[in-house]
Image (cartoon, coloured by chain):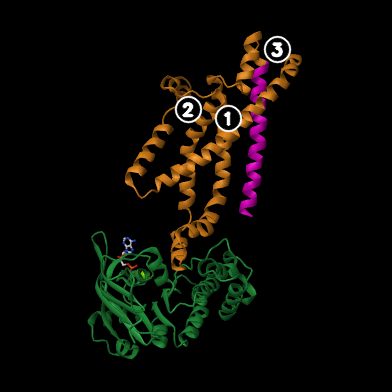
């Protein structure tokens, strides 16, 4: 299996360009996951049992079906009922919604990690609910969540190639196109692997830096 | 004058467990009262219902002559809303066994921020009040420390200062020395002793420190099964208890 360095060098710029799409898809999906996750976490604490159960059921459903199936559904089934979205938008909504179910759990665990006594002290000091939340509970709950969330972002990054299946021209899809034009898979796929590896390593290093900061 | 705290036929249950069983209790203005009794007899629950940390299943609690859980609207009596509860809570401060300081704030901020946020005191006034109270509990050289760097005794003194900053009429103390190493108990009791000299401050304390209860309280309430089984002056309750259970409890505590 010879590795053609010249060929690799010639396709690298295309792949790097495509990884911008991959990175953008990661950030946008992650932002969507953070927001939807927040609503899910709030819903799971709702006063209304029906809301709690409905949301719990939905998150269980999303977590136990494959992301690929969900993307296919969004991309190929929704148009049949008149909802058509461009591939990139479909991809980030799908990936974001999928991970929002995990991220809701991170929020919940973070809130529960703050001892009950903190709430009680806040009540005894006559804080209202929202002030207690923003000034006392969240400042304690958020720092330990940050590394966990960042790791989810890295996982999402590594899941972006599924978007190739719904025609998003991201890194994987670009490599695929190059490879199938020439029937040469070794170089493009090796480079894709290396680009993912490099970016993941950088991100993991960043997470460790943040973690070190937080622990102080 | 009316009592500052009145509990009338108060009932509290946790599922099948009856924790307060038709409790009647009055505390006069400025009175220093100690609650003693076996574990599980409902002492903490009494304080927690007064602080609104627990709701009640029956009966009535009055603070400063006003119902805690009900309010008047015109001529009708309706369940208390949040504004009423907040007005009632402002008369009461509470100190917990586990301190419950806010770990992300320095000592100064722990005492200053709540009065700024909740009472809306301007920063210079809140700061002055906080610094004065921190000095009162003897921690002026720790103002900029985080709670995690303090001993248990020091943390508890900050917690007392934090509650006092609201200038409550009533202070509730739930076993505030029980989580402390023995050598740190004294410094917290000294602060309580000092507060006991405040004529106007009502203090209700749950304690296992019998000597201390005897020394600073005007009245001892002996709890059992969610009721007051015996009450009276320290001399009466400690020297000639009339209730067999009180006698047994005091004997057990003395031997411990
Ligand atoms: N949130 C709760 N849920 C269920 N049971 C509870 C709850 N809080 C208290 N209890 C029970 O109520 C009873 C009275 O509790 P409480 O804490 O008032 O007792 P106590 O007199 O303060 O005891 P101790 O001296 O051990 O602190 C106990 O049996 C306790 O287990
Ligand atoms: Mg107790």
Chain given the colour orange = A
CB within 8 Å, label 2 to label 3: no
Quadrant hosting ligand 2: bottom left
| Disc 1 residue crowd, few under 14, some 14–19, many 20+, Cα 10 Å | some
For mark 3, name the chain. A
Q: Which residues are magenta?
A: A187-216
**Residue B245 coordinates in the image, percent (x, y):** 25, 79
Residue at the extreme top: A182
* Residue A88 quadrant: top right
Residue where numbered disc 1 is placed: A158
- Chain for disc number 2: A
Residue at 32% across / 64% down in the picture? B55
Pick the front one: A103 or B228: A103
For the C terminus of chain A, the quadrant is: bottom right
Location of the N terminus of chain A by quadrant is top right
Q: Are marks 1 and 3 in contact (CB under 8 Å)?
A: no
Tag 3 secondary structure: loop
| Residue A196, image x, y percentages | 64, 28
- Judged by depth in the image, the label closer to the viewer, 2 or 3, is 2
Residue matched to label 2: A67
Percent from the top left, x then y, of residue A13?
Answer: 73, 21
Q: Could you say which disc has been placed on residue A96 in the image?
A: none
Q: Colour of chain B?
A: green
User: Between disc 2 and disc 3, whose residue precedes?
Assistant: 3
Q: Mark number for residue A2?
A: 3
């Amino acid at each position: 299996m010879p590795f053609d360095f010249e060929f690799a060098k010639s396709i690298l710029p295309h792949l790097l360009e495509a990884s911008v799409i991959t990175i953008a898809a990661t950030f946008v999906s992650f932002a969507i996951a953070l927001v939807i996750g927040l609503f899910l976490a709030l819903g799971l604490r709702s006063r209304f049992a029906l809301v709690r159960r409905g949301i719990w059921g939905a998150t269980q459903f999303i977590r136990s079906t494959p992301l690929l199936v969900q993307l296919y559904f969004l991309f190929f089934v929704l148009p049949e009922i008149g909802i058509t979205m461009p591939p990139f938008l479909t991809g980030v909504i799908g990936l974001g919604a999928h991970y929002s179910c995990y991220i809701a759990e991170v929020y919940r665990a973070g809130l529960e990690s703050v001892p009950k006594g903190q709430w009680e002290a806040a009540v005894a000091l006559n804080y209202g609910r929202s002030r207690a939340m923003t000034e006392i509970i969240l400042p304690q709950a958020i720092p330990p969540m940050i590394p966990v969330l960042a790791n989810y972002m890295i996982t999402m990054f590594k899941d972006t190639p599924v978007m190739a299946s719904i025609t998003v021209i991201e890194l994987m899809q670009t490599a695929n196109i190059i490879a199938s034009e020439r029937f040469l898979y070794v170089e493009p796929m090796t480079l894709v692997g290396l680009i993912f590896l490099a970016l993941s390593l950088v991100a993991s290093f960043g997470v460790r830096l943040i973690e070190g900061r937080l622990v102080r | 004058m009316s009592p500052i705290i009145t509990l009338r036929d108060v009932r509290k249950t946790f599922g099948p467990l009856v924790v307060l069983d038709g409790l009647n209790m009055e505390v006069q203005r400025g009175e220093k009262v100690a609650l003693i009794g076996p574990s599980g007899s409902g002492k903490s629950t009494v304080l927690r219902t007064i602080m609104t940390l627990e709701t009640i299943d029956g009966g009535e609690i009055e603070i400063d002559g006003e119902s805690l859980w009900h309010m008047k609207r015109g001529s009708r009596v309706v369940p208390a809303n949040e504004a009423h509860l907040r007005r009632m809570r402002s008369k009461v401060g509470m100190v917990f066994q586990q301190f419950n300081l806010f770990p992300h704030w320095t000592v100064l901020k722990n005492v200053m921020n709540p009065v700024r946020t909740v009472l809306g005191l301007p920063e210079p006034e809140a700061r002055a009040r906080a610094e004065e109270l921190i000095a009162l509990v003897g921690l002026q050289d720790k103002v900029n420390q985080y709670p995690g760097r303090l001993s248990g005794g020091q943390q508890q003194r900050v917690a007392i200062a934090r509650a006092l900053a609201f200038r409550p009429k009533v202070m509730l103390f739930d076993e505030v020395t029980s989580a402390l190493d023995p050598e740190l108990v004294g410094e917290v009791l000294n602060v309580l002793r000092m507060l006991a000299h405040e004529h106007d401050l009502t203090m209700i304390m749950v304690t296992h420190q019998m000597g201390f209860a005897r020394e600073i309280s005007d009245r001892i309430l002996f709890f059992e099964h969610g009721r007051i089984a015996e009450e009276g002056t320290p001399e009466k309750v400690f020297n000639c208890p009339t209730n067999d259970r009180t006698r047994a409890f005091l004997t057990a505590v003395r031997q411990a």
